Image (tube, rainbow, N blue to C red):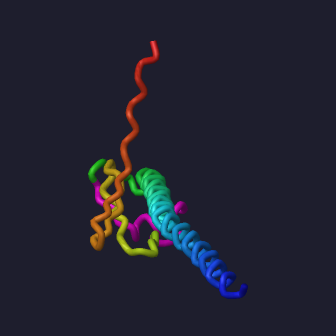
């Protein structure tokens, strides 16, 4: 009797292990995609913070369109940025000149994230 129980128990254990392996394999891409999207959202929020800091600095420094700004000037002069933005996976934020939107670049994987200018509101009539 015990000889027939062992193969059945072995099959049941292998089926459970197989199901668990399949669940793990299916979840890995989902977790990676979620992590990547979360990182991109964080970068976009930081880019918006940089835009706000630039807008804060323009009247304080009397800057004209095309004038260069550095991250250090934004941190020192604006109350909206306390420190240089940090990303755990590397990369750098490029402030850009007045009138230009900031961007994020990471050379390792070629990631470039730019903000888009909002489209002008159309005529509702």
Q: Nearer the viewer, residue 58 or 29?
A: 29
Residue 46 seen by the camera = no
Q: Nearer the viewer, residue 79 or 101?
A: 101
* Residue at x 38% of width, y 34% of height: 119
Relative height, residue 120 to residue 52 (above, below): above
For the point 39% across and 30% down, the residue is: 120
What segment is highlighted magenta in the picture?
A: 67-84
- Residue 99 x %, y %: 33, 48
Q: Is residue 10 magenta?
A: no
**Per the image, is 79 magenta?**
yes
Q: Where residue 78 appears, x then y in whole percent?
A: 49, 62
Residue farthest along the bottom direction in this orientation: 2
Choose top left, top right, bottom left or bottom right for residue 17: bottom right
Residue 3 picture location, percent across and down: 66, 87
Residue 96 appears left or right of 30: left
Left/right of residue 60 with respect to residue 20 in the rendered view: left
Is the stretch drawn in magenta largely helix, strand or loop? loop
Question: Residue 83: x, y in percent?
Answer: 50, 72
Q: Is residue 60 left or right of residue 65?
A: right
Is 79 rendered above or below residue 66?
Answer: below
Is 95 situated above or below 19?
A: above
């Amino acid at each position: 009797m015990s000889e027939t129980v062992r193969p059945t128990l072995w099959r049941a254990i292998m089926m459970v292990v197989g199901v668990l392996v399949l669940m793990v394999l299916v979840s890995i891409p989902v977790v990676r995609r979620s992590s990547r999207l979360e990182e991109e959202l964080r970068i976009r929020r930081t880019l918006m913070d940089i835009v706000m800091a630039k807008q804060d600095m323009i009247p304080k420094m009397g800057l004209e369109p095309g004038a260069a700004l550095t991250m250090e000037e934004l941190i020192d002069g604006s109350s909206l940025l306390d420190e240089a933005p940090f990303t755990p996976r590397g990369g750098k934020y490029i402030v850009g000149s007045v009138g230009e939107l900031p961007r994020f670049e990471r050379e390792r994987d070629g990631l470039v994230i730019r903000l888009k200018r909002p489209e002008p509101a159309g005529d509702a009539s």
